[in-house]
Amino acid sequence: MSKEGKLNTGDWVEDMVEVFTAPLIVYPSSWQDTLPDWIKSEVTLQRVVRLMKGDDGLATDVEALAYMYPRTLEAPLDHDWTQIYMYLATKVMGSRLSGKGTEIPADIKMERLETYLESKLIELKRWISERQRKAIAERRKADNRQEREEIAAKRKAAQPALFDF
């Protein structure tokens, strides 16, 4: 996706395709398949919004939440990551619940992060985004390799056998 901080119209179609096809990176765990479906659809929505606002090269809040979700089911998080997780949950769930007349309980609501924790969250979002870009590049490389092999096979099949021994 564009990293200039604004929408690059020349790459717009490619960027939009990546919104829908970039992999969802989650913590590798036996719990990774338990990610709620609404989070998956929210990822796409937040990616579109990020693209329209201008891609900052970071994963979205819901992508960071989705990454951390299976990890929270493995073992308790330390204090810093618990604060970050609650902050993400407040942002993601807050917007989801606001239209339903429900609110996040005050004792777990985190509306701000201190600077150090915010830098850790940005580092996580950057790491997730890098993993997505690597996965996309690997997928393209595999697609190109397969396409070249198919073309070579078709060419070989179409070429007449001039010398049969």
Image (cartoon, rainbow, N blue to C red):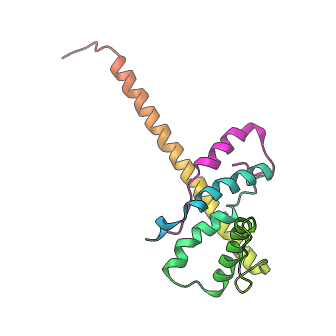
Q: Residue at x 64, y 80 (%)?
A: 81
What segment is highlighted magenta in the picture?
A: 1-30
In the image, residue 149 sits, relative to residue 15, either above or below, namely above
Viewer-side residue, 96 vs 85:
96
Quick check: 91 left or right of 142?
Answer: right
In the image, residue 135 sits, relative to residue 16, either above or below, namely below
Total marks placed: 0
Q: Residue at x 47, y 43 (%)?
A: 142
Viewer-side residue, 116 vs 76:
76
Q: Where does residue 98 sit, x and y in percent of width and height?
A: 75, 68
Viewer-side residue, 54 vs 110:
110
Quick check: 23 left or right of 82?
Answer: left
Q: Residue at x 50, y 38 (%)?
A: 144
Quick check: 40 left or right of 118?
Answer: left
Q: Where does residue 80 sit, x and y in percent of width and height?
A: 67, 84
Q: Where does residue 141 sit, x and y in percent of width and height?
A: 51, 43
Viewer-side residue, 48 vs 10:
48
In the image, residue 111 sits, relative to residue 32, either above or below, namely below
Q: Where does residue 17 sit, x and y in percent of width and height?
A: 63, 43
